[in-house]
Amino acid sequence: MNSTEQKEFLQATAWLRPFTRWAAGFSYKTDGVLPASMRNLPLKLVKLILASYHKSSGSGCK
């Protein structure tokens, strides 16, 4: 991935940053309260979204 592709990827996923911060905070704050599968669900959703953006940009692992 070259620098222009990285910039495009960051611009395309900028809307996701606040949700990513919230998901990380949620996971950290609910440690010991919720089971790991429930606690990490928002982070897994972020991961799936980022993976789909990365795959659609044509920069997948070869």
Image: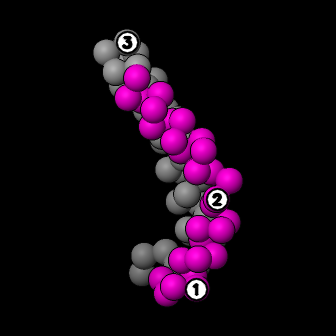
Residue 60: percent from left, percent from top: 49, 74
User: What is the crowding at mark 2: few (fewer than 14 residues within 10 Å), some, or many (at least 20)?
Assistant: few
Asked if residue 35 can be seen in this view, the reply is yes
Q: Residue under circle 2?
A: 14
Which residue: 53% across, 60% down?
Answer: 51
State whether residue 34 is above or below residue 50: above
Report helix, strand or loop for mark 2.
helix
- Of label 1 and label 2, which has the lower sequence position? 1
Residue in the foreground of this view, choosing between 27 and 36: 27
Q: Where does label 3 land, which residue? A: 33
Looking at the picture, how far across and down is residue 7, in whole percent?
A: 58, 77
Amino acid type at mark 3: Val
On screen, residue 57 versus residue 61, left or right, reads: right
**Image location of residue 20, percent across then percent down:** 53, 44
Amino acid type, residue under disc 1 in the picture: Thr
The reply, left or right, for residue 30 in relation to residue 14 is left
Q: How many marks?
A: 3
Q: Are marks 3 and 1 in contact (CB under 8 Å)?
A: no
Q: Are marks 1 and 2 in contact (CB under 8 Å)?
A: no
Read off the residue under disc 1. Answer: 4
How crowded pointer 3 is (Cα within 10 Å; few <14, some 14-19, many 20+) is rated as few
Is 61 in the magenta? no
Q: Which mark is residue 41?
A: none
The quarter of the picture where the C terminus appears is bottom left
In the rendered structure, which disc, 2 or 3, sits on the residue that comes first in sequence?
2
Residue in the picture at 51% in, 36% down: 23
**Scheme of colours in the image:** one colour
Predominant SS along the magenta part: helix
Left or right of residue 26: residue 49: right
Residue 31 sits above or below residue 21 on the image: above
- Residue 35 or 28: which is nearer the viewer? 28
**Segment colored magenta:** 1-29
